[in-house]
Amino acid sequence: MKCDVITLFPEMVAPVLRQSILKRARERHLLDVRVVPLRDFATDKHHITDDMPYGGGPGMVLKPEPIFAALDRIKQERGGVRVIIPSPQGAIFNQGMAEVFSREERSLVFICGHYEGIDARVMQGIDHEEVSIGDYLLTGGEMAALIMIDASARLIPGVLGDSDSIEEESFASSLLEYPHYTRPREFRGMKVPDVLVSGNHRAIRDWRRGQSLLSTLYKRPDLLAHAILTNEDRQWLGQAISGMRKEGESVRWIS
Ligand code: ADE
């Protein structure tokens, strides 16, 4: 996966890419991310990248020229690009988008806005998608870009140590994860469930599946609408729901 992050604040982005799994993915050449300092593309003496809005009003607006110049350079170097503008006005990012991004052949170019916004001619003159990471306001697009890169990069084959872990985990299967335990077997009076130390792999698998189903039922029942469930799963959920009813709990059930 290739990415270019156009930003006024390279130090908000670069250090994150030098840690942990993203660092390893870059070292293995599975992920190629370049941080592109917008200021380098401002041609005036003071490298000005923003200006006052026409018509007045608070805040500053990112000028179009450095953004177009940065993108022209990236196009020359990368060939194909897919431009993403992180914005609270965009479609909400989700696991499906992460999967599509992880398979993208072109470079994903993130244009990170700050201050009051970006000159509207950027959106007018550049083929792009606006993508939001949720219904709240950030100070700029950098952290949103990092979140999208992180969620997408971990889906590239070979980035995570054990590719099976992708299959099993939340959202890929539309179910939340089962609880995980490590040593010690007892901590502050809290014990690891016996089944996990029983050595009975079938019983462990069934217990984990049951925990995933229960956790999803309690915390995110909306996800069950998209989950692929076996007859056994449905039976188990049915029993759990009738148990909850008996205890007088309300269930938000989406069939
Ligand atoms: N920039 C500001 N807020 C944002 C959000 N919620 N998602 C993406 N980019 C943003």
Image (tube, rainbow, N blue to C red):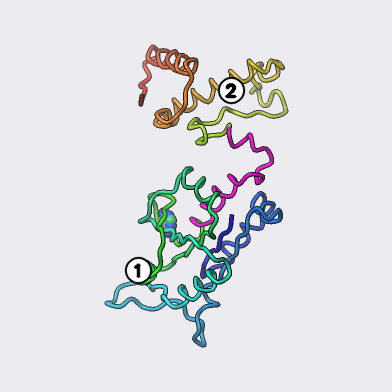
Residue visible at 41% across and 61% down in the picture: 128
Q: Earlier in the sequence, mark 2 or mark 1?
A: 1
Q: Amino acid at mark 1?
A: Gln
Please provide percent x and percent y for residue 47: 51, 82
Residue visible at 67% across and 52% down in the picture: 25
Q: Nearer the viewer, mark 2 or mark 1?
A: 1
Vertical placement of residue 224 versus 128, above or below: above
- Ligand 1 falls in quadrant: bottom left
Q: Secondary structure at mark 2?
A: helix
Out of 155 and 55, give the one closest to the viewer: 155
| Residue at numbered disc 1 | 124
Vertical placement of residue 72 versus 130, above or below: below
Where, quadrant-wise, is the N terminus in this rendering? bottom right
Q: Is mark 1 within 8 Å of ligand 1?
A: no
Q: Quadrant of residue 211?
A: top right
Q: Is residue 65 left or right of residue 191?
A: left
Please provide percent x and percent y for residue 19: 66, 54
| Residue at numbered disc 2 | 208
Please provide percent x and percent y for residue 237: 45, 18
Instruction: Check residue 198 for magenta coloring.
Output: no
Where, quadrant-wise, is the C terminus in this rendering? top left
| The residue stretch that appears in magenta | 144-167
Please provide percent x and percent y for residue 123: 37, 66
Q: Amino acid at mark 2?
A: Arg
Residue visible at 40% across and 64% down in the picture: 127
- Mark 2–mark 1 distance (CA, rounded to whole Å): 50 Å
Residue visible at 58% across and 18% down in the picture: 206
Q: Secondary structure at mark 1?
A: helix
